[in-house]
Image: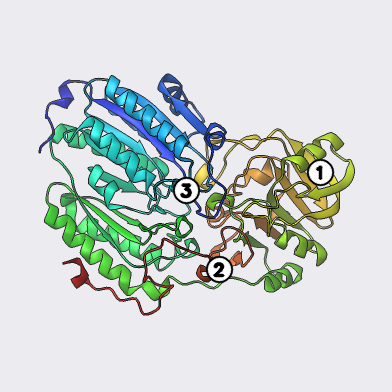
Amino acid sequence: MSLRKGHEMTKPRVALLGAILESNRFAPPAELDDFQSLTLLTGDALMSEARSETPKLATEFAAFVRAMDATGDWTPVPCMLAASHPAGPVREAVIEEVIGTCEATLRACGSLDAVYICNHGAMVAEHDHDPDGLLMARVRDVVGPDVLIVSTLDLHANISQRMVDACDLIVGYRTNPHVDQIERGEEAAFSIRRALASGERPKLAHIKLPLVPASVTLLSAEHPYGSLIDFGQRRQAEYRSQILNVSVFGNFLFSDTPDNGLSIVVSARDDQKVAEALASELATKAWSLREDFVRQLTSLEDAVALAKAGDRRPVIFSDAGDNPGGGGSGRTTELLSALYRAGAKDCLYGSFCDPELARDAHATGVGGRFVAHFNRTRNASAPWAQWDVPFEAEAEVVSLHNGEVVGEEGMTAGRRLILGPSAALRIGGITVVVITDRTQTADPVFFNAFGLDIAAARTVVVKSRGHFRAGFSPWFSSEQVFEVDTGGLTSPVHDRWPFQHLPRPNYPMDENTVWSRADLH
């Protein structure tokens, strides 16, 4: 069915909503408080924040609003945007409240021309493996078949057929680290404008492969994932106007769902067969690269030895097993204590999430000394308790901060971050940044806010899996980056986890997994 034409003569009515959560099946559940602490906005408050100079909500959502504002009159219908830092499965009552609020607003708002859904795509709920698809399907049920639905998703999304069936266009990030959210939000807005003006209904094709790579292999500037994304973009350009979007979703391993697996989603302007042909070509290309989606990590012993080595370039370590951006606690001490015991010098370490320790530092004051108790209080029954080992060291308070900062580089550039009371502590030759809010250290502002000189450090350690690469690229090339094999809820080693829901067989867990283009028919 074609969309109604003539929207250029009137102001299109576009609903805006979203639920953003990357779920690590093994992390503690996402509660209502987790959304309230990051983003839980409706109505005018949502639009006001999206239009602010330094919005603290999802970058692509704000970019969508700015692009719609810049391209003509429109009537926004803001429903709700809910976002949490990565956590475990969302509570059933929480996601049902979010979906219910969106449904109620959509029912009450009258006629609509389009809906923009800003989700992550790798959410898990207590009662549903695919709450992203659940939200999208229920939005479709309310607005009916004739209203255009466009969604933006993180490239780590676990794409379900329910998502594809509910949407007219799906726009995935192309970069990891994620530095193209502005472009993707703009693309969603321009796509809505174009479709409403032309009356054309996009056609989607989706293929999922039995390929479940870990996030450390999904860097868009490196082979194989970057090669696959680049190949898709070249082929889209060769199809010219026939193809609207090509997205390659790498999946999020730790969600542990039946929808895990690398997915190809192709959107054609109006020809389903064209979309299917290109999706098939890209899937075949991806499968041919499957053996390249395996990566070796740097051992803890080798990392410590490198930190102590004298004649070398500065390096940056990823504490890969404890990435708050993938559901990690931000409190594991394995790498920190090893570096301290080894006497590492000129080392910056960020960021340790410990509200109690941050309060102790503020009570002590700049220049004061005290015994820093890392993980003084912990829940012994928590999923991450085995890694959140207590650690003590004599500390000097180097600097204090209220934790309100604006990102400077990479994925959080220009975005307001609320880290809570924070401190920089010197323990031996290591300066540790301690924060209150559980957030990955993907931006140099985590050090710069305390007056710490990244360029003067010989070793920088970040609790981040991959996004730090964009934020710290002015100091460290890819050859200076080392992903350390540490324990924690984001350890990217497949055989360490009791997966229960991943589709089997899959590669690399099952080396003899077979797939061919013939499987599509």
In the foreground, 81 or 182: 81
- Residue type pointed to by label 1: Val
| Residue at 79% in and 63% down | 344
| Residue at 37% in and 54% down | 158
- Residue type pointed to by label 3: Glu
Is residue 383 at least partly visible in the picture?
yes
Left or right: residue 385 compared with residue 425: left
Q: Are marks 1 and 2 in contact (CB under 8 Å)?
A: no
Q: Which residue is mark 2?
A: 496
Is residue 458 at least partly visible in the picture?
no
Q: Which residue is mark 1?
A: 398
The quarter of the rendered structure image containing the N terminus is top left
Callout 3: SS: loop
| Residue at 29% in and 47% down | 163
C-alpha distance separating marks 1 and 2:
38 Å
C-alpha distance separating marks 3 and 2:
20 Å
Q: Nearer the viewer's eye, disc 1 or disc 2?
A: 2
- Residue 22 - label: 3
- Sequence-first tag of 1 and 2: 1
Q: Nearer the viewer's eye, disc 3 or disc 2?
A: 2
156 versus 94 height, above or below: below
Left or right: residue 508 compared with residue 376: left
- Residue type pointed to by label 2: Arg
